[in-house]
Amino acid sequence: MEYHYRPWTGLVWGLITFASVGTITAVWSNPWFVRMTSVAAWEFPAVLLLAVLTGVFFAVRFTACGARRAGIGGVLSFIGIACPVCNKILMLIFGGPMLLAYFDPVRPYVALAGLILLAVGICRNIAARRTALATGWVVP
């Protein structure tokens, strides 16, 4: 028995992630969202890597293994990439000056932590797939 990967599903979700996260975080200019701070050099590659990892996650998704980690990773990456001033929740909690002084310097690390959690979720799914193939376990 063989369990197939879904490359087209992964490609579609990767493209959706790239377009939506890049637009919402205003990494590129668009008529819907305006960024209050300048885009850092690491943000576009982070959006690209988030999209690739999201696509891979949906292409290899086998069971619920890793879904929570992947979801938390996606949210953390989004928070890390997004403009800190535009994030209304963070703005209400910290206020503008504190947000720029304390959260802005750690945003790359928040995004990196999210990407790592997403990668761990992918590894969990691949491990579950390999275990299922080795033991003959069938998912309905």
Image (tube, rainbow, N blue to C red):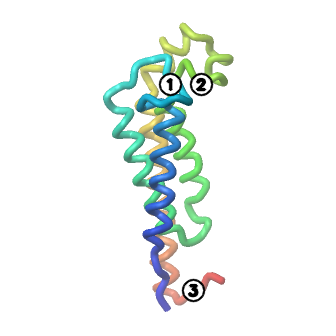
Quarter-of-image position of residue 43? top left
The amino acid pointed to by label 1 is Cys
Bin the neighbour count of mark 1 within 10 Å (Cα to Cα): few under 14, some 14-19, many 20 and up. Answer: many
Expressed as whole percent of the image width and height from the top left, the position of residue 79 reads 54, 33
Q: Could you tell me how far apart the alpha carbons at marks 2 and 1 are, in whole angstroms? A: 7 Å
Whichever of labels 1 and 3 marks the residue nearer the N terminus, that label is 1
Q: At x 53% / y 67%, what residue is drawn?
A: 61
Query: Is residue 17 depicted above or below 10 in this figure?
Result: above
Whichever of labels 3 and 2 marks the residue nearer the N terminus, that label is 2
The amino acid pointed to by label 2 is Asn
Mark 3 or 2: in front is 2
Q: Do the residues labelled 2 and 1 touch (CB within 8 Å)?
A: yes
Q: Could you tell me how far apart the alpha carbons at marks 1 and 3 are, in whole angstroms? A: 45 Å
The residue tagged 2 is 87
Query: Is residue 118 depicted above or below 25 in this figure?
Result: below
The label shown at residue 137 is: 3
Give left or right: position of 78 versus 39.
right
Element on which disc 2 rests: loop
